[in-house]
Image (spheres, rainbow, N blue to C red):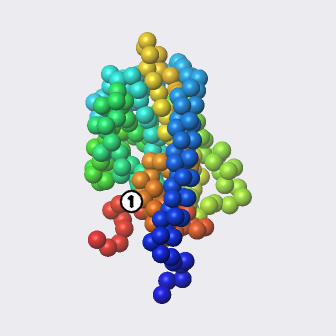
Amino acid sequence: MTSHRTGTREEWLAARGDLLAKEKDLTRRGDQLAAERRGLPWVPIEKQYRFGTDAGPRTLAELFDGRPQLIAYHFMFGPDYTAGCPTCSSIADGFNGNIAHLNARDTTFTCISRAPLDKLQAYKRRMGWDFPWASCYGSDYAYDLDLACPVETARGWLAGGVPPVAAKNARECGTEPAVYVSEQPVMNSYTLEDGTVYLTYSTTARGLEFMMVHYGLLDLTPLGRNEEDDAQLWLRRHDEYDGP
C-alpha cells in the first residue's frame, strides 16, 4: 500500500485545477521575462576571434552561416580534457533534433569549446551527434566572454572544498577538479546586424535547465529528479548507463 496521500478522481481534478491555475500564471510570467530578455541592451563584439570548424577557419560572424541570429553553447571540453563534460553531454543529446526548427526561424546553433577541433570531432563520432561544434582553441574568446577562467582562479574557488559533482565530472573528463571547473557551461545569444556581432543574452547554471529535457520530464513524475543532496551525481553520458 502506498504511503502517499490518495484520493478520488473528483478530489484529484479539484487539486489539479488549483495547480493548473498556478502553472498558467508561471507561463504568463515566463512570457513577460522573455519580453524583458529581448529588451536587454546589445553589446558589440569588436574583437575578431577565429574558430576551427568542420568547414575550416571561421570568424564569429561567419558562424552565423548567413542567418541573423546565433545561439552558441559553451560546452565544457577544455584542451586538457580527455572527454566532454557528462552534464554538458546530457544537454547536448537534445540538440540534433532542434537544428532544423531553429534554422527555420533564422537562427543558427553551434556548440563552442576550447578543446582542439580533432578532439571535438572524435567525441561527436562517439556520441553520435552531428550538430555544429566549433573550437576556440588558442583564442581569447572563452576568457573574454567569461566562459572560462585561469586554472589558478578555479583553484581559489575550490579552496574550501571540492563539490562531489565537480570531483566526479573531473574524473570522468580525465582531469583534476580545478581544470574541470575552469570551464563554464554558458549559453550565449548573438545577433548580426550591419556586419557587427552583438551579444544579446547569456545564461548559465540553473538558467540552462530548460535545455535539460530529461529534467523537465522527471519533474512530471512522482519521484521527480530524485537527487536530494547529490544533484547530478547520477548523470552519465548516454553510452555509459548500465542496462538496455
Residue 53 in view of the camera? no
Q: Which of 88 and 106 is in front in this view?
A: 106
- Residue 168's spot in the image, x, y percent? 52, 63
How packed mark 1 is, by other alpha carbons closer than 10 Å (few <14, some 14-19, many 20 or more), is some
10 lies above or below 203: below
- Residue 116's spot in the image, x, y percent? 39, 40
Q: Residue drawn at (27%, 51%), measured in percent from left and top? A: 128
Q: Is residue 28 left or right of residue 69?
A: right
Q: Residue drawn at (35%, 23%), measured in percent from left and top? A: 67
Residue 239 in view of the camera? yes
42 lies above or below 136: above
What is the residue that sits farthest to the top in this orientation? 194
What amino acid type is highlighted by mark number 1? Arg
Q: Residue drawn at (47%, 75%), measured in percent from left and top? A: 8
To which residue does mark 1 refer?
A: 237
- Residue 18's spot in the image, x, y percent? 55, 58
Q: Is residue 52 left or right of residue 179?
A: left
Quadrant into which the C terminus falls: bottom left
- Residue 190's spot in the image, x, y percent? 47, 27
Q: Under tag 1, what secondary structure? A: loop
Quadrant housing residue 177: bottom right
Q: Which of 226 and 117 is in front in this view?
A: 226
What is the residue that sits farthest to the right in this orientation? 160
What is the residue that sits farthest to the front in this orientation? 10
- Count of number-bearing discs: 1
Q: Is residue 160 left or right of residue 78?
A: right
Q: Residue drawn at (68%, 50%), measured in percent from left and top? A: 157
